[in-house]
Amino acid sequence: VSTEVSTDLADREALAAAIPTAGEDTPVAKELADNTRRRIQLTGRTFPKPSAPRVITVANQKGGVGKTTTTVNIAAALAQSGLKALVIDLDPQGNASTALGIDHHAEVPSIYDVLVDGVALLEVVQPCSTVPHLHCAPATIDLAGAEIELVSLVARESRLQKAIAAAAVQGHDFDYILIDCPPSLGLLTVNAMVAASEVFIPIQCEYYALEGLSQLLKNIDLVKLHLNPALHVSTILLTMYDGRTRLSAQVADEVREHFPEQVLRTTVPRSVRVSEAPSFGETVMTYDPGSSGALAYLEAASELADRGAAVRS
Ligand SMILES: Nc1ncnc2c1ncn2[C@@H]1O[C@H](COP(=O)(O)OP(=O)(O)O)[C@@H](O)[C@H]1O
Ligand SMILES: [Mg+2]
């Protein structure tokens, strides 16, 4: 009898040793535990309301760095956290409109009508059906021609700024207006920079991440000097971070070294869920709220909101 018991005990101990403990000694268990902690900390938190609406241009003339993904998910996270947000889609491709499930076929009133024909901004704004308090001024294919049509119009650089100012006079109650820029430094991006006081730069954690950044900063300085003295780079977000590569960590370190004040602590991991969401006309914030990508965007939005509040107090 006594031998049987001791054998059982030995077996059970061996078994227990073989099973990963409830601790966090495997990467998967650690990530799950981290995600759960972050979700508990952030979900349902109400972000501080800025004392005045914040108009933020999301810019980087490189394509595919995460501008659109960042714009729609940060805006959705802000809206889910008690603030009212507007996304202005300023890219003729209309990816932000698509990602928010907003109708933007050729006949829909759009930001083109606002910029070129002087239609009121609030007349083209549509609500996002999956996220309350989130709205979008869509881009249609017409916008592709605006870059050229704007050239011959009066006040061609400040048409968006005037449209937002007019909406303020009409009493819009957006706490955040995020402008998704096309991958160029043309008149559309200049309009976005004149309309905003903050520039938010997403940087992809890849080779050549910093290439082209000096051109972007030079343009921001030019707009600041000649058209909009309030403009400044307030926020940088590292996107598509791959924790398995040294490259991602190196790029992140380098960017943090150059811009210690602007870079958010949160980095957005490369995540399939993030890239799948737009094909369902949803942000990842509703498509898979528990995913690492959604949590990262919630955390980044929380930092953005806290910083805005801190700057003013
Ligand atoms: N964190 C991420 N993980 C995986 N894919 C991503 C992530 N962020 C963006 N992507 C994908 O990368 C591509 C480029 O992103 P996008 O936001 O459209 O960049 P931009 O607007 O700068 O051109 C898109 O297919 C998008 O779904
Ligand atoms: Mg885009």
Image: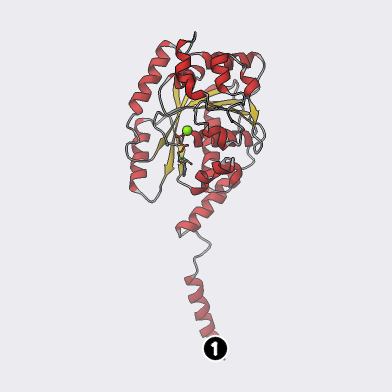
Residue tagged by mark 1? 4
Number of numbered labels in the structure image: 1
Residue at the outermost front position: 107
Residue 205 lies, in percent from the top left, at 38, 40
Q: How is the image coloured?
A: secondary structure
- Label 1 secondary element: helix
Q: Nearer the viewer, residue 101 or 73?
A: 101
Residue 279 lies, in percent from the top left, at 55, 43
**Which residue: 66% across, 15% down?**
170
Q: Nearer the viewer, residue 152 or 250?
A: 152
Quarter holding the C terminus is top right
**Which residue: 48% across, 12% down?**
156
Residue 302 visible in image = no
Q: Label 1 amino acid?
A: Glu
Residue 230 lies, in percent from the top left, at 47, 16
Q: Is mark 1 within 8 Å of ligand 1?
A: no
Residue 203 lies, in percent from the top left, at 41, 35
